[in-house]
Image (tube, rainbow, N blue to C red):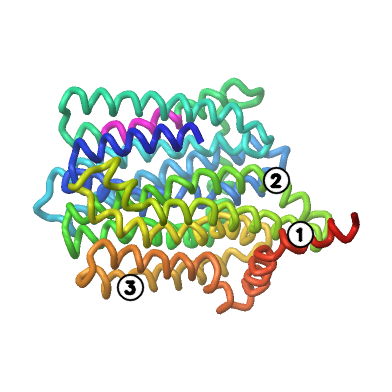
Amino acid sequence: MVRMLVAFGVGILVARYLGPELYGQLSYSLALILLLIGVAGPGMKDVITQRVDQNKEETTQILWASFRLMLVMNIILLGIAFLIAVLLRPDQPVIWAMTVIIGLGNVFRAFESFEILFLYRLQMKRTVLIQAFSFFVISASKLILIAAGADVVLFSVAVGAEILITGIGFWWLYRKEKDSGYVTAKPGFATERIILKTALPAIGGLAFTVMLFKVDQVMLGWLSGDADVGRYAIAAQFSEYWMYLATALVVSTYPNLLDAYGKSRELFELKFTRLCSVLIYGALAIAIPVWLLGEWIILFFLGDAFADSAVILGIHIWSVFFVFLLEAMKKYYVIERILPAFIKVTLFAALLNIALNLWLIPEMAGQGAAWATVISYGAAGFWGLLLFGETRRAALLILKSVVYPFVWLLRRNHTS
């Protein structure tokens, strides 16, 4: 919550300082990097956690193999991101530079492989402190850049540096642990190959998920303009800030879900239903106030230059329901070992998002992108699950989670 509040305040100041067009260029570069480098490491995390759980004696080997694999993949993906930036924006060297700078920072996401050990042991306090230190240092640096009248490129340096500092911090924490020394690869990189093969469906599914979140900004920059990207990006952030809550809750309950699954199917489904219920009603508590106060929020914090963002926010905020549910579904796919279904659902939603953006952006600009987001997020987080046999049960559990609090209250009153 503290990070959300600080990020909100600093983000507002950065957007006001840069204005819609320059803020749009910064958001475009970041979106392009997240579409590529933002999927490799996170896509492997759950699979690596599960492998550590099943092979505790090989924990050191698994973590170092994961680091090597993430590092190589991130370097390759950075090169691809640069080529895409050059092809889509051939006359924008500033965007090329910011894409490379942010991308270099994101290469250090490979160090997140060491964070997995602490997540698995439910020792999140230590990793959260590292993340908080990095976050507050970079937030302060952004304020200094604003006071100094800095160029937009320097803000991209700050964005990339946050990942760099966090990654080094995770490595430092891990080095303090016993038996944390470097482990050479097995012949033929056996562990890396096993991790990659197992995680590929998760990486693919997450790639399509990230596409849902960020392709709209890339397409806005391509089909409309940087100013529209800036107005849309700041509105989307008012919705996406809340993802931290869902991610924190789901990550902290993941080991308990794994434990419940090992005990009985009934217990696992009960805990999953409870989790979805908390996420749904938490999203409702967020969406209604933001929807009612959206115009005032935008005008008060950002001014007339971002006035068009108010309508976008009023549409985009309703996607928070499906974003929250999607966080829970990511764990469901891994636990149930149906990662290919993750790919099918998210691919369907991503293609739907692209099609809707191609149709709506030329006519409605940022508002069209917001409608495309809500509809396609809905496909990924709920109604798209009904289209596939492997995920239909999850959709029914989500429906059950809507009425779960009322059923629980009735049972409690009856027992009383």
Residue 373 image position (x, y, % from top left): 38, 64
Q: Main secondary structure of the magenta part?
A: helix
Residue 157 image position (x, y, % from top left): 27, 32
- Disc 2 marks which amino acid? Pro
Q: Nearer the viewer, mark 3 or mark 2?
A: 3
Q: Is residue 183 left or right of residue 337?
A: left
Residue 109 image position (x, y, % from top left): 44, 39
Tag of residue 186: none
Q: Is residue 209 left or right of residue 13?
A: right
Q: Which residue is tagged 3?
A: 356
Above or below, comparing residue 191 to residue 356 in the picture: above
What residue span does the magenta drawing correspond to? 156-167
Q: Which residue is tagged 1?
A: 270
Q: Which residue is tagged 2?
A: 255
Residue under the image location 46 percent in, 39 percent down: 110
Q: Are the residues tagged 3 and 1 within 8 Å (C-beta)?
A: no
Above or below, comparing residue 396 to residue 68 in the picture: below
Of 220 and 68, the residue lying toward us: 220
Q: Are the residues tagged 1 and 2 within 8 Å (C-beta)?
A: no
Residue under the image location 30 percent in, 69 percent down: 357
Of 177 and 205, the residue lying toward us: 205
Can you name the residue that lies furthest to the left here?
91
- The quadrant of the picture occupied by the C terminus is bottom right
The mark that comes first in sequence, 1 or 2, is 2
Can you name the residue that lies furthest to the right here?
415
- Disc 3 marks which amino acid? Leu
